Image: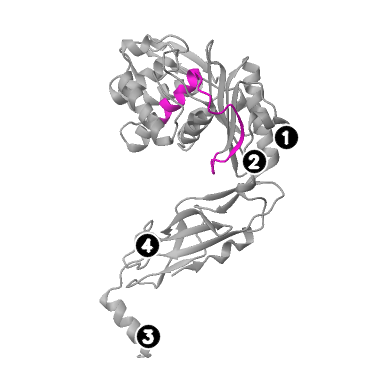
Amino acid sequence: MKKLLSVFLMFMTFAVAVSGVKLVKHKTLADVGLETKSESAYLMDFHSGTQIYAKNETERLPIASMCKIMTLNLAFEEIESGNLKLNDTIVVSANAAGMGGSQIFLDANKEYQVSELIKGIVVASANDASVAIAEQICGSEDAFVAKMNEKCALLGMNDTHFSNCTGLPKAEQYSCAKDVAVMFSALAKHKDYFRFSKIWMDEIKHDGGRVTEISNTNKLIRFYEGCDGGKTGYTSEAGHCLAATAVRKNMRLVSVVIKAPDSKTRFADVSSMFNYGFANFENKLIVDKETPLDIQAEVVGGKQETVKGIAEESYYQFCKKNEKVALNIDFIPAQRVKAPVEKGEKIGVLNVYKDNVLVKEINVLAYETVEKQTYFDIIKNIISEWGIL
């Protein structure tokens, strides 16, 4: 049985349909009043994945230390799966400690906490910490890189191939602005990432009292309102690169530039794209996973006849400002919700329609536990229905 979720009708007249958003290519820069100087650039909405601006977005280019975005993705996946803990300690190999380029100067054959190594990667783009994490997870950097490429396939990153986990120059290592935005969006879904990404200055402590002071290579976390994460990169081959995210109200944007002519330009290009996105678009929260829905599903054999629902995930409508769209949201209860019902159990689905086309399916979960009726509950109900005193 399909039930109309009328509680959402109040949202149905806000600004623009997703299909009305223009996909901007380099040749139409004048149409949007936005110009970037980097060789490749990309701007997207985090929640919907909608492309807002693109310039040479699928051109295969070296991306330097932005490769570490995938390294961090795999590290946080291991942490969330329970295979690795932030307070675990790792013995750093001589191979990892000997990495060149940007580093936090780890001591070979010494123990470091996982949290310190991740902090070193996120804040200081440390090559030595990246290899130490890779070796801990897969036993070797080569095995870890194979896993990085497997993850590319899962994310649909068709113009990316990794040869190491650091971004140091190596043959057959490339990506593109669009793919970097995809993998950075995946990283931004890991809440623990933001524990480190907003650090401006800190230090890494070593045995014997030695300290390595670090500062965030992403200057926008200090100088751009709403920016709370990012990853820089630089080699002479890749130029100056940056992937960053910023959030204002309900909208989070992801911006990427590759091969900017200098560091100042990469920050300016990303800031310009953020400014354009926040000025011209908005993201309306339609379904909030934190708030119980104004719907109930019938329960068979329970101590109560219905159970209240809550969405498994939030749903946002990405919109261009000052245009209108109509949405319909239907609640489809499960065919038979039978007691006992555990909190978090699936009890139905929300279907979101735009112009009568299904655009999103969201599982509805039980907001509360409903216990099964006992024999005495049944007798009590019979007595109540028949008015027996």
Find out whether the residues at labels 4 and 2 contact each other: C-beta distance under 8 Å.
no
Find out whether the residues at labels 2 and 1 contact each other: C-beta distance under 8 Å.
yes
Q: Residue at x 49, y 30 (%)?
A: 179
The label nearer to you, 3 versus 2, is 2
Instruction: Name the image quarter holding residue 162.
Output: top left
- How far apart, in angstroms, are the residues tagged by discs 1 and 4? 54 Å
Amino acid under label 1?
Asp
Q: Which residues are magenta?
A: 46-73
Residue 119 visible in the shown view = no
Amino acid under label 2?
Lys
Q: Which quadrant would the N terminus be assigned to in this image?
A: bottom left
Mark 3 neighbour density, 10 Å: few (under 14) some (14–19) many (20 or more): few
Instruction: Name the image quarter holding residue 31.
Output: top right
- How far apart, in angstroms, are the residues tagged by discs 1 and 3? 71 Å
Residue 79 visible in the shown view = yes
Q: Residue at x 46, y 54 (%)?
A: 362
Asked if the magenta segment contains residue 302, the reply would be no
Amino acid under label 3?
Ser
Mark number for residue 31? 1
Q: Outermost residue, front direction?
A: 27
Along the polypeptide, which appears first: circle 3 or circle 2?
Answer: 2
Name the residue tied to disc 2.
22
Asked if the magenta segment contains residue 52, the reply would be yes
The label nearer to you, 4 versus 3, is 4
Q: Give the x, y percent position of residue 293.
A: 51, 61
Along the polypeptide, which appears first: circle 4 or circle 2?
Answer: 2
